[in-house]
Every structure is written in structure tokens, then in C-alpha cells.
Amino acid sequence: MAAHHVLSVIIFVTCIACYYNSCYCGFVFDDISAIKENRDLRPHTPLKNVFLNDFWGTPMHKEQSHKSYRPLCVLTFRWNYMLHQLEPMGYHLVNMLLHALVCLIYFRMCSLFLPETSSFVAAMLFAVHPIHTEAVTGVVGRAETLSSVYFLAAFLFYTKATKRKKSTGWRYLVLSMLSMATAMLCKEQGITIAGVCTVYELFVAQKLRVSDLQYFVRWALSGKASLLHHTWTTEATRRLTTLSLSTVGLLLLRLQVMGSKLPVFTRFDNPASVASFPARHLTYNYLVSVNVWLLAFPCDLCCDWTMGTVPLLTSLLDPRNLATLATYATLATLVFVALTTDNRQQATVIVMSLALLILPFLPASNLFFPVGFVVAERVLYMPSMGFCMLIGYGWSVLVEKRLGKLAWLGLMVVLLSHSCKTWLRNTEWESEYSIFMAGLKVNQRNAKLFNNVGHALEVQGRFQEALLYFNKAVSVQQDDIGAHINVGRTYNHLKMFKEAEDAYLRAKSLLPKAKPGESYQARIAPNHLNVFLNLANLIAKNATRLEEADMLYRQAISMRADYTQAYINRGDVLLKLNRTKEAQQVYERALFYDSNNPDIYYNLGVVFLEQGKASQALAYLDKALEFDPEHEQALLNSAILLQELGREELRKVARERLLKLLHKDASNERVHFNLGMLAMDDGDSRDAEHWFRRAVQLKDDFRAALFNLALLLADEHRALEAAPFLNQLVAHHPNHVKGLILLGDIYINYVRDLDAAEQCYRRILELEPDNIQGVHNLCVVLVERGLLVEAEACLRRAHRMAPHEDYVLRHLKIVQSRVAKMGGAHAPSSAPSFSAPLPHTNDSSQQTKAQMPDFTSKLPEDSTIEQQQNTKKLVRVGGEEKTEEQSRRKETTERDNESDKQQEKAARVKVEHSSTTSENHGNKHRDTSGSEAGSLVTQGGSQVTPSESLVTKERSQVTSKVAKQSLKISQETHQAKPRKTTPLVTEEERDSS
């Protein structure tokens, strides 16, 4: 017993040593869909959804569902997520420990049929076999390891049931049935333990021989067949009956869950499935030998064996048929030996090895029904148990034949080489780029591998390199719709829109053509519908082709009524067409098919914002957060709406949401900015300055943060600290009028640089000839220069422009008084002129840039709306949103909308984020004059001495802009979806080739 424990420890340590480096791998391949993008893992998702949806989080009743029902495995993923969210190490650690547990249980099972040393050899070989790397290192492989735990437990319980008395045997039989059900709920292969237990009952527990079979067949033909003449049959029949009924019940339940429908796979996933006789049958039987070869010689491993990896066998003359014959001949020989040998142990080991090898493999063999792959290494995890047991027995035979040294030497070589191969193979699973490049080293016929390498490069922004791989995928598989979609998407990234549209049109032309009397929806793979969305998204960038884009969305919806992504994108186009009511109806229709989708609730919030219904908009944003508390756009925009309401308790909620965003992504400059605006609202200028400075550090051309930071510093009489930020602002945004006004103020009041101030004001008047502040402040410059006559004419013009502005009239009278005393003569300049031109103001490139029209599809960056205590009515003027009534106050807040696009990553969805930024203009200016006629009074009413400068006060409005750009899911697909062949919305859609 002590020796058994020591051997168990060795097995456990070996597992950890071989797979330790897997803990440093990330999420790759199917992990993206099953973990990162699966909403069922999130704690806010109802737990019942785990039992209603498939392995990938898609409702089982949907057409695009993969029908993989593994709720217990998903529960373990959810447990991982609860502990450490999306940190990969925890997921890999659990997989490694599960594999070690399987090895220990497997060691115990082998001990039932083999000597302890031979069982140890089999368990060690199983522990280090390289074919298991996909099942252990790939996180989704947990379905194999977890199912295997209960698979082996069910078998061990059944063996105990056969050895116990009737009173205790039933207890173990029930435990065996429960373990079988659990194994099946972890992965479908678990149900095959019923066949293994049946084989054990007949050929091991009851020692059925060939003569018994002959007896049964003879009596069956005579119509009087009965096995009851054996004394063992009563108890055995009861156990087998219980086993059969349990299996049938579980299978019926499984069929009920999947709606009695098999999943639909494309011909690219499994080319032989659409081939005719004899190609289909020859290919499927040849695949058996391919799997046996991988178990015996796991040298050329590949993460994906679909598409053209294994060319079809179209003729009996194909030499690969010899491998098929050799495989079946070997299996037949082993069966014959097991049934005819007088060596009881030999027969038992061979029979059980073959049962463990063949039965778990049958569901994935394509022999009874097509599956979504040609070969999959991870499905060999269970079958390898039988293979390793057979090798362990063969090793013991060599030892018994006095070939012990050779046997031990061979064992050491195999274990060492397999361990090294496993360790190295783990490193290839480190990232998507590494695993797919490793696949290309051994497989150049699979277009999906080229697509996936291209996608990995695309994520890194290496679009030119990605395009090479996508084009290679097209050359390998010219009718691969997904490869053409990927080419089009990459051209889109490279701003080569004409080439992108051509690629999408080629992909569209490859879609199956409708036939009279045949349902088109049933004939097209769901993921290939994404070509309509990609093409429509591209066309929608041109405002004159929005109707054409809408037609493509409607065409996609007509082919699949529950295509929620098409509804979402169509709603975005309808908003651009100002058909907000229709957009609302489209989103509500999408909710009918996907009532748990937070993006749809968010978009409805956007629609109600467009309609000016802030309270309803906030309700939908909160609803989006109910389904996804991490929804970045909903968090940001709901926080700003709460801030707009002006109540202290709501500002607290807004701050909590912004801090939550900050915790998720500390590099989001908009979050820092809005935290600064909240601090301003609370009167905490120190915190506001901190957040504004941080926002500027993250984005040096962040116009709203630059302006508000400068304004805050100027308001605290730190004008010389504000000046660099204003220079930075106008360098990036030379048309920023308010920044120019404030900078001009600083040049006059603090720097005493009249030339630079004049440049600021003249630039303002170039942009806005009727800007009263610019005109008046230019008049001030003339006064400071001593050009009183010109200043008088200037102020007269200002008075005509704004006859109701008292300060303009008052300043005009002061200047007129001074001119009258001087007899109308030009006074000499009373202030020195310093040449300090405004940085970049006269730069021709900047001027050209400022004058260039913006042909992009982004929202205007200067969209603003007035923030008042009462309800606001918005009007759209030339791309800007402003209030009909402008408030004039000493403290002014301007909130600009920065319309940069952001990418959403937990749910792998590409969205155009709407963000909200603000500019707070609360600077207090002074209105002074050096007139001998008396002191001038500022607009606020305070008196200043004659030596002070004459400076206007900027009449600005309190404005705020809540982002109202719709969330648009861009179905730009990556034709790189591995075995999960249904559409899954990610950062950019990843589909099955």
C-alpha cells in the first residue's frame, strides 16, 4: 500500500512538472468564445442561463447554437471568473490539477486489470502524452478532464457494484449512474461509460466466452434463447437493465434539451460530410487510422484539422486505404485474441483496453453522424486511456519474456521524449499567434490557420502582414467566404475602401444561390451572413449610401429573423437618417429575440437621448448595466446623465461608476476628465486639477481637458501655469475660440505681449467674424497700444454688433472721452510691443489643416448643449447641438463631445463608443482702462485702477454634452472561428471558415 502511495506521488509530480508552464499561457482559440465572450460566466447573468444555453453561451433553441450542452463545466468556469475574473492563470491551474486527478484515478483503475508496475507505466504514459496538451493547456479542454473524472468514477463504482452483495451493491450502482449523468453534463462523451460498464459486466464480471456467445446465438435462432441457465444472469441482468434504462433516459433528456435537432456545420469544417459515396465513407474510415497514428506517434500536432488538412479519399486505389485496412486488421486481431485466448488476464486487459479506446471515440468518429471537425486532438483524451493501458500491458509482456532491460530503456526514452514534447507544445499554446504559426509548420493546406494567423497580426495592428496571410488563405481555399471577408476587413483598416468593397462583393458572390421552392435561410451558414453586415458597415461610411446599407441589413434580417447584430447595425443607420422612431422599433424587435443583450438596451438609451427623453434614456442605460455591470459606455454615459441632474446623492453614484471604469481601464482619459468635472461640480478644485492633468498625460491633444485645466489654473490666479496648456490646446486645435480668448487674456494681463494677443483675437475673427468678445478684446489691444482713434472705431463696431452690452458702451464712452481730451490726435503707444507670436498660429500647415473639411463619419467634436437648471430643448446647427438660449454667467462650463471610437474587449464586440467630455469656462476677467476721465468698472461691478489693462469678460454659456452616438456592433468578421461554427460577436466577429 505504501508503494502505491509513493507511485501516486510520482505520477502527480510528473503531471505538475509537465504542465507547470501551461499556467503562463493566455486565452487562445476556443477559449475566446467559451471564456472571454461567454456572458454566462458573469455573476450578473442568472444562474439558470447556464442550464439553458450551450457551452458557448448561445441559447440551445437558436439555429446558430452549437448544441454542446455542458453546464457543469461552464459552472466551473463561472467559479473561476468569480474568483479572479479573466486572469488566465487560475483557469490553467485548475486544468492542470484536474489532469493530475484523472491520472491518479486512472492509475487506480488500471490496477484492477494490471500489476502495480504495469499500471504505473500506463498512468505515467497517460500523464505525459503530448496528445493531451490541447485538452489540458487549452482552457476549454476542461470539458475533457472534468468529464473523465466522473467517467472513471462511474466505472469504479460499477465494478464495486458487481463485487458486493445485493444489499450494498445497489448503493454503488446508483452512485455509478449519478456519476455517468455528471460526466455527460460535463461533456457528451461521458455517456459512453455505459458501454464500457456493459463490456466489463459481460466479459470480466461474468467471464462471458466465445462458447457462451455461440450458445446464445443458437438458441436465439431457435426462438428459445435464454441466458437464465447461467446462475449469474439474474443480478447481472438487473444491473444491465438499470444501466440501459439510465442511459436511454439520459439520451432522451439530451435530445430534449437540444430540441431534437443536430447542429448545422459548414462544408469547410468537415469537407467529407458533404461528399458523396465512396469519398465520404473512405475518408471517414481513414480518419480512424489518422487518430491511431496520433496516439502512437504524436509528433506533428496541430490545433485545427478542418478544411483541406486531410484531403478526401475519392478512390479505392488511393494508397491511404492501406492504412485503414491495417488499422482495422490490428483491431480485429486484438478482438480475436481476447475472445479465444486461455490467458484470462490477457483477455481481460485487451477487452477493457479496446472498450476504453473505441467506445469514447465513437461519438466523434463521424461514423454514425457528422461532427464539426475532421480530427480533434482533445477528443482523444478519453480514448487514450485504453491505448495507454494496452501499451502498459505490452510492456509487462516484454519484461516477462526476459527483455526487461530493453523494456525499461524503451520506457525511459518514450517518457522523456513525450515529456519534452508536452513541455514544448505547451509553449506553443501561449498566444494565438504562436499556436497558429505552430499549426502552419505542419499543415499548409488549412486556410483557417492562415486566417487565424492573420487575425492575430491584425490584433497587434500589423495590417499589412495580416493581409498577406488572408490572401494566402484565399489562394489555399478560393471558395472560402470567410477569407474574402477577412481580406475586405483588412483593406478597410488600411483605408483602402474600394478594395475592401470589392473583397466583400466577392465573398457575397460565393453565397449559395436561392433555388425555387427551397428555403434560402436553411441553405446558408449563419456565420456567412456577416458579409452583409461588413459590406453595409463599409457603405454606411458614405452618407449618400445609407439607404443602400439599410437594404443590406434588411436582406440579412430576411434570411435570419433572429439576427440581432443586423438589427443593431440597422438601428445605427436609421439614426443617421434621422429616423429615430423607426430605430427605436428596430431595437425593440431585437430585444424580442435577445432580451438579455445589454448593447440593445444601451442603444435604446441612445435613441431616447436623441428624442430628448433623459429619464427614459437613463432607465435603459441602467437596464444595460443590470445585464452587464461592466458595460463601459453605459457606465460612462449614465454617470454623466446622473451628474447633469445636479443632486449630490446622484453625483455620488456617478462617481462610483466612473471609478469602476477607472479600475477596469486606468488609461481611459475620458474617465479621468469626467471625474475632474465631478470635482468641479463639488467645488474641489484640487481634485479637479489632478484628474485634468492625468487626462492630458494620457492624451496630449485632449481639447476639453486642456481647456478646463487651463481655465481652472487661470481662475486660481495661476495664469502663467495655464499658458502652456493653452498653447498646447491651440497647437492641436487652432480653431478653439474659447481657448484663444483665454490665451489672449493671459498675453495682455500677465505676459504683456500685445502682438501675441492680437494674433489670438484676429484668429478668432477669422473663424467667427461676429464674435463680440474677439472684436472687443481686439479693441482693448488697440487701447493698450495707444491707438485711441482706431480703438474708438473698433468699439463703435462692437457696439453695433451688440447694442445691449453695457460694458461695450461704457468702454466706448471712456475711449471717446480720452480721444476728445486729446483733440482726436493719435496718442503714442503707452505700452511696449513684444514679439511673441502665438505658437503655430501662422503655420500654413496648421491653417490648412484647420480649414480642411472633415469627411469622416465621426460626430463633430464641438457638439455642445447648454446646461441649465430647467429642461433643455436641443437644436442641431451645422453638426453642433446647442441650446436655443445661451446663459451668460461669470463662471462658464463648456462640455465638448470627443467622438473618438473605442473598442469593447470582455465581450469580444466592436462598438463605436460614445463618450462625453466637457469644458468648464469659469474664469473671472477684469474690464479696466487707463482713462483720466475716471476708473472703469468691470462687468461684475468691481473698480480697478487706471494702470490696469482693459480686458473684456468672455460671455460664454454653461454647456454640457451627453454622448448620443449610437452603439454600433460592426460585424467585421474574422474567419477564424475554430470548431464553434456559429457567429459570435467579438471585438470584430470571428467566424468559422
Image (cartoon, rainbow, N blue to C red):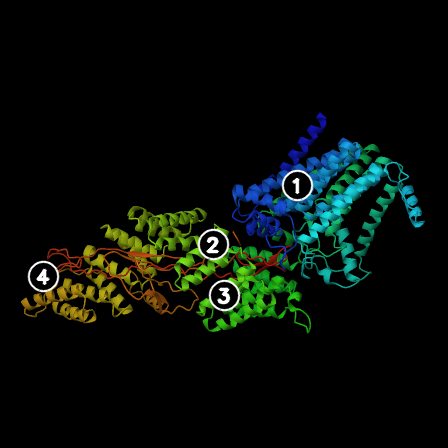
Marks 2 and 4, how far apart at CA: 63 Å
Marks 3 and 2, how far apart at CA: 18 Å
Q: Amino acid at mark 4?
A: Ser
Q: Amino acid at mark 3?
A: Gln
In-front residue for pair 154/342: 154
Judge whether residue 109 can be spotted in this image: no
Ranked by sequence position, the earlier of labels 3 and 2 is 3
Q: Are marks 4 and 3 in contact (CB under 8 Å)?
A: no
Marks 4 and 3, how far apart at CA: 66 Å
Q: In front: mark 4 or mark 1? A: 4
| Quarter of the image where one finds residue 880 | bottom left
Q: In front: mark 2 or mark 4? A: 2
**Which quadrant holds the C terminus?**
bottom right
Mark 4, other Cα within 10 Å: few <14 / some 14–19 / many ≥20: many
Residue at left offset 56%, top offset 41%: 90
> Which secondary structure, mark 2?
helix
| Quarter of the image where one finds residue 272 | bottom right
- Report the disc number at residue 585: 3
